[in-house]
Amino acid sequence: MAARPLRISVWLLAAIAVAAALHRLAQWQLHRQLVHEAAVFLAPLARGDTPYRWPLHRPHDLVGRRVFGDCDFAFDSGALLLRRGSRSCEIGVPLRMALDLRRFDRLEISSATPLPSFSLVLREQLDQPQQIAQVTTTEQTPLQVKLGQLAWRLDSGEARPQPPRAAMLRLRFGELAQDLRLQAIALQPQAPQDWSAAAWLPADSAIGMLAPAQFPLFRVDGSPRPETVLHWRQMLREHEPASLVVFRADVGRVAAAMQEMPSHTTRAVSAWPWAIVVTVALAMLATFARPVGPVRMRACLQAVLALALPVWLVVGLQLGDDIGWPAAAAIAVSLLYAVALACTDTATPGYRIGSPRTWLLASSAPLMALGLVLTLGHPGTYATISAASLVGYALWALLQQYLICVVFADRLCRAGLPVRWTVLAAAGVFALLHAPNAALMLATFGGGLIWTALWLRERSLIPLALSHAAAALLLGSGLPSAVLRSAEVSLRYYL
């Protein structure tokens, strides 16, 4: 009898250790990401260049991966070709955050052919009206345009002063009489400065707009929660869009990271993502072409391979605002492997409605989510949950529950892992699929413990998927951003 309390105590200690490790992972990733962001932005400035540079070499370099309007265009020899006869061409550059037009007030356009006059179109905020300025070109190469010398106006014709920021930036060309070959667009700083000597200000201080000569560098003192740090960064960027935030302990690492940053002229595409995807895909094929080892070993290997690429994509911050081909291939390979495993499964699929007891136990997750919202949320600011969002998220939750419970947890049980440790392992992997979102990882770890345990006992996925969807929507709509910043994962969480 004494062995059972001991086993329970060991398991509880292990669960606490996993939760602590997940939080530590989120902090470590945040430290690295903030240093990387600062180095990427400051390194070009230290070399006399600009971080606001957009080469026009491929579709990924444009918003929507194309030129808008009635435009005949192509990518040719490292340039964007706009063919003569095009009636209207509008080029949007992708922005991860708003542009600082107070410190970077010189528009530079590199072109292999003479530039016709065009309009510069921007929005200070995405929900604000667009502002337009007409640019008269010269024979200067590359073209340099002082934004402060342009006559800015709204669509209505109302005059406006030079905008201090831009959340959207586009170049609009009228009918083209000749071919136009655009090579790059850039925003240059108003004057070279020694950014390495700039002071790092406290990130939690009430600071408005700084003088243009003072660069907005901010440090985080102590070890606040990741959500708190990102909330400070968001607030700072409302006043200073180029704000950089790093932990005090990492300020010295920024300079070292800047030295390792390649210039935009030497940047190369890494082959490592493709190597990882191909290696895992070949290992997946091997489990079908030539089954490896005894049944238990094969089940364990299948469980690991099924979620290896998704975990790599999320924890490795491979999923940003624009999914590349390696990431897309990794997602496709993982889904195909899950389908292939489902075709070989002989167990009951688990799509039955479930008993009243299953529904009652599954309701514990959304009830706990509701308790957190009522405790930590702010009444009056809750977002409305529509029926369409509940149905859509339920289908997405069903896919996640299938991968974690049927593909992963069931195979760990076949491999001989005791149920309690299978539950812990599945919940831990489920939490990793929500990295580096610290609050969401801890929430999904708790939910994963409930849902995996219920699956192994009740064998019904539908109540689990609805419980998952309800809990997620309650947390996402009811918690403030300082507690749960968003439901985004991977690199998208930092954007």
Image (spheres, rainbow, N blue to C red):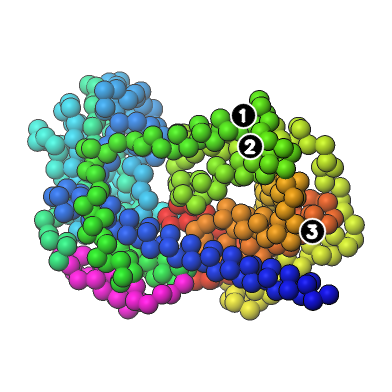
- Mark 3 to mark 1 CA distance (whole Å): 31 Å
At horizontal 43% and vertical 63% (from top left) the residue drawn is 28
SS of the residue under disc 3: helix
Foreground residue among 269 and 129: 269
Residue at numbered disc 2:
335
Determine if the magenta segment contains residue 224. Answer: yes
> Residue 386, can we see it?
no
> Residue 94, can we see it?
yes
Disc 1 crowd rating (10 Å Cα; few below 14, some 14-19, many 20+) is: few
At horizontal 13% and vertical 50% (from top left) the residue drawn is 48
Foreground residue among 394 and 65: 394
Residue mark closest to the camera, 2 vs 1: 1
Q: If you read the primary sequence from the N terminus, does the residue marked by circle 2 or circle 1 appear first? A: 1
Q: Of the residues shown, which amino acid type is indicated by label 3? A: Leu
SS of the residue under disc 1: helix
Disc 3 crowd rating (10 Å Cα; few below 14, some 14-19, many 20+) is: many
Residue mark closest to the camera, 3 vs 1: 1
Residue at numbered disc 1:
285
| Up/down of 444 relative to 491, above or below | below
Q: Position of residue 199 (x, y in %)?
A: 20, 71
Q: Of the residues shown, which amino acid type is indicated by label 1? A: Leu
Disc 2 crowd rating (10 Å Cα; few below 14, some 14-19, many 20+) is: some
Residue at numbered disc 3:
454
SS of the residue under disc 2: helix
Q: Is residue 492 left or right of residue 5?
A: left
